[in-house]
């Protein structure tokens, strides 16, 4: 009788098993990389959107504050004001007027200080910048309020809430501003609008 020798199976992996394990690990790592990249793009998009919202909110608030106070005229009375609250108004530009020193006339800008309160203040878009001028008739003494502007519009309403193009009839202004994020990458934009009643008219 011949005895058959049975060898126990040796521990370890075959080459095929190692290759299959490496391929599976590669697929899992590639999936994780794609997921991380997508999460990063989403997070960056959220940051861009938040930045555009913050910039638009700050710019609108600045304009609304000055528009609300336009038309201060301590020497004039309705309906015989010495000047209009808003002049040179257009769909994308306007000039705000106030007799801040109470002398009955609108004085010039004086020193070129873009942060100053002056009797003639203008807003307009140049390129992609919203600019504020303290010498509005000549667009001089300009400072940038915010960048990344893709659209700015002003709509003017009279006392009956009808759209008007007559400067003396303006009582309410609708400001609409669209910004894109300045961080680059995917294009993100936000549109904000606010409506303000002139307090002094």
Image (tube, rainbow, N blue to C red):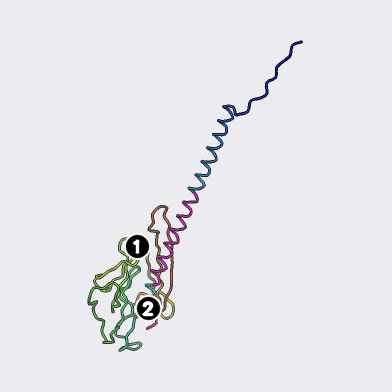
Residue 16, image x, y percentages: 58, 27
Q: Residue at 43% across / 66% down in the picture?
A: 192
**Seen from this angle, which residue lies furthest right?**
1
In the picture, which quadrant includes the N terminus?
A: top right
Checking the image for residue 147, the label placed there is 1
- Is 22 magenta? The answer is no
Please tell me whether mark 2 sits on a helix, a strand or a loop: loop
Mark 2 highlights which residue? Answer: 170
Q: Is residue 201 visible?
A: no
Q: Quadrant of residue 148?
A: bottom left
Q: Which residues are magenta?
A: 38-61
Please tell me whether mark 1 sits on a helix, a strand or a loop: loop
Q: Residue at 25% across / 84% down in the picture?
A: 105
In the picture, which quadrant includes the C terminus?
A: bottom left
27 left or right of 6? left
Residue 50, image x, y percentages: 45, 61
Q: Residue at 23% across / 78% down in the picture?
A: 108
Where 30 sits versus 39, above or below?
Answer: above
Residue 60, image x, y percentages: 40, 70
* Circle 1 residues within 10 Å: few <14, some 14–19, many ≥20: many
């Amino acid at each position: 009788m011949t005895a058959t020798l049975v060898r126990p199976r040796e521990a370890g992996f075959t080459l095929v098993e190692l290759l299959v394990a490496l391929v599976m690990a590669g697929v899992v790592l590639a999936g994780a990389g794609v997921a991380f990249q997508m999460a990063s793009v989403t997070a960056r998009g959220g940051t861009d959107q938040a930045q555009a919202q913050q910039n638009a909110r700050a710019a609108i608030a600045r304009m609304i504050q000055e528009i609300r106070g336009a038309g201060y005229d301590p020497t004039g009375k309705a309906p015989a004001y010495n000047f209009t609250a808003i002049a040179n108004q257009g769909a994308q530009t306007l000039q705000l007027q106030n007799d801040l020193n109470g002398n009955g006339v609108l004085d010039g800008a004086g020193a070129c200080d873009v942060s100053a309160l002056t009797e003639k203040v203008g807003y307009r878009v140049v390129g992609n910048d919203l600019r504020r001028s303290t010498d509005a008739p000549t667009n001089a003494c300009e400072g940038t309020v915010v960048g990344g502007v893709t659209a700015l519009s002003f709509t003017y309403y009279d006392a009956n809430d009808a759209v008007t193009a007559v400067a003396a009839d303006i009582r309410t202004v609708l400001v609409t501003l669209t910004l894109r994020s300045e961080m680059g990458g995917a294009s993100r934009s936000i549109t904000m609008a606010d409506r303000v009643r002139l307090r002094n008219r």
